[in-house]
Amino acid sequence: MPSSNHLLSDVEIGRREYRSAQTVRSVLVSLVSTVVFAVAIWLTVINTPGWERVQQSFFNLEVAIAAWPRVIAGLWINIQVLFFATIGVLVLSILIATIRTLSGPIWFPLRALAAAYTDLFRGLPLIIVLFLIGFGVPGLELFPRNSAQFWGTIALILTYSAYVSEVFRAGIEAVHPSQRLAARSLGLTHSQTMRIVVLPQAVRKVTPALMNDFIAMQKDVGLISVLGVVDAVRAAQIETAANFNFTPYVLAGLLFVLLALPMIRLTDWYTARLRTREQMGSLV
Amino acid sequence: MSETVLRLEGVRKTFGGNDVLAGVDLTVQRHEVVALIGASGSGKSTLLRCINLIERLDDGRIWLGDLDISDPRVSVDRVRSRIGVVFQQFNLFPHLRVIDNVTLASRKVFKTTRAEAEKAALELLDRVGLADRARDYPDRLSGGQQQRVAIVRAIATNPELLLLDEITSALDPELVTEVLDLVRELAREGTTVVMATHEMAFARDVAHRVVFLDGGVVAEEGPAAEVLLRPREERTRAFLSRFTGSL
């Protein structure tokens, strides 16, 4: 609000009173409608004929408590894989995106290789990449014996870098050519222009899209369980098999959602901030 | 005095079968201010872009000092670092503060230390009355202020030649003066300038020489007052008759 000593006119005071009354009213309406909606859903579900059996085998608190230590230890593995995969994806995808924007005949083989890579790994289902990398590469006996967790991380990096590099490339191409022109006119080389002028602006443009890809990867980390890594999903599977009860899966699912929530909220907040900035505080 | 900074000989540039430049000859001496005038599409901007090696020539030669810069073996980055350019749309880097925009070339191309580059940049910004905006981002500045920053950025590395490409065309009328006053001052100090412009009164006051481009060639050139007030060629007269109010 303006910080002047201006005394508000009666008309403005009236308008403000009307607006705050409207705000109270809309909060009340949304509260009541939410409660009614939730109760209706709840009553429908608990009155289904099979509800008790479903509750026993999917929402069993005792089983959840028993499974907790194993599942949470598994989730810690997922978080580690996520951490290294994120760093790997950022490095590899920026590299690929930059290679794809290089001009000049000498770079042709690299450009072609980068293009083939993005085509291949955007087309391949992640689970197939996991099997091929996780079981195939160690079979070459070229590399020191690394864990399934290591090769699972590599498979994630390879798959997600293919997508994310295309996001970066779109961002690089969205930076107006006059920016490149101005930088080169100052005598900056191609790579200096890329590093100092184009990439920083490109990254800002694609940040919401990148955050979305990060959220997608956050849950796909659970797929490394197919390699035998005892992550949250695998731990839940073990617990489920031991008790003939599916509650551990629900528990693991909830934990993944909780893990993703901060990032989801952050993405929403960031896009909202970008939007308000672009419309300069207008009401629409 | 007469040391040649720039020499063009038979410069040609064709876009899709259309001869935008059809053999342009031009010589610019040190401390000289040359105004390029001509209708839209007469090749003023293209000529500046050729000099800065942004466009490749289709024929002819260009020398910067003793160096034939139309030779494909010269380093374009080296050539461009010897020439300052100011664009119609400013083209400041929006993600860098004013001070970083101005010092970028000094630091990255000439490898000056940040402290030294910033000291020099602040002096220049102070002279154009923008030292207090050094830590701001470009979008906080008015169009006239942005264009003054762009000029400071172009001269921060002491280029031998300054190219100005219709630098007031994107400005509101009341902001034009502050930019032109700065160019006037640079001209007084002896900066060598080639500028494409539609500001005839300004060209008359500041330019030593006016070059009228028409049909891709130099149709008329000479001292500013002569070309603008007593043109010899019929087509120069026809072009200038559209600006009678401003002269």
Image (cartoon, coloured by chain):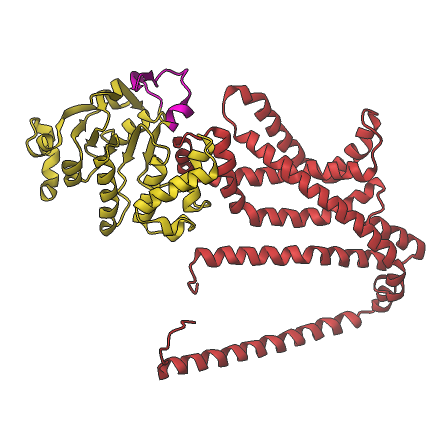
Q: How many marks?
A: 0
Q: Residue at x 40, y 71 (%)?
A: A2
| Residue B238 in the image: above or below residue B9 | below
State which quadrant residue A249 falls in. bottom right
Asked if residue A158 lies left or right of residue B193, the reply is right
Asked if residue B171 lies left or right of residue A29, the reply is left
Colour yellow, chain: B
Q: Which quarter of the rendered picture does the N terminus of chain B lie within? A: top left
Q: Residue at x 72, y 42 (%)?
A: A84
State which quadrant residue A269 falls in. bottom right
Magenta-span inclusion, residue A228: no
Magenta-span inclusion, residue B77: yes
Q: Which quarter of the rendered picture does the C terminus of chain B lie within? A: top left
Asked if residue A33 lies left or right of residue A78, the reply is left
Part of the protein shown in magenta = B56-81
| Location of residue B220 in the rendering, given as x and y in whole percent from the top left corner | 13, 25
Colour red, chain: A
Q: Nearer the viewer, residue A230 or B117?
A: B117
| Location of residue A14 in the rendering, given as x and y in whole percent from the top left corner | 40, 83
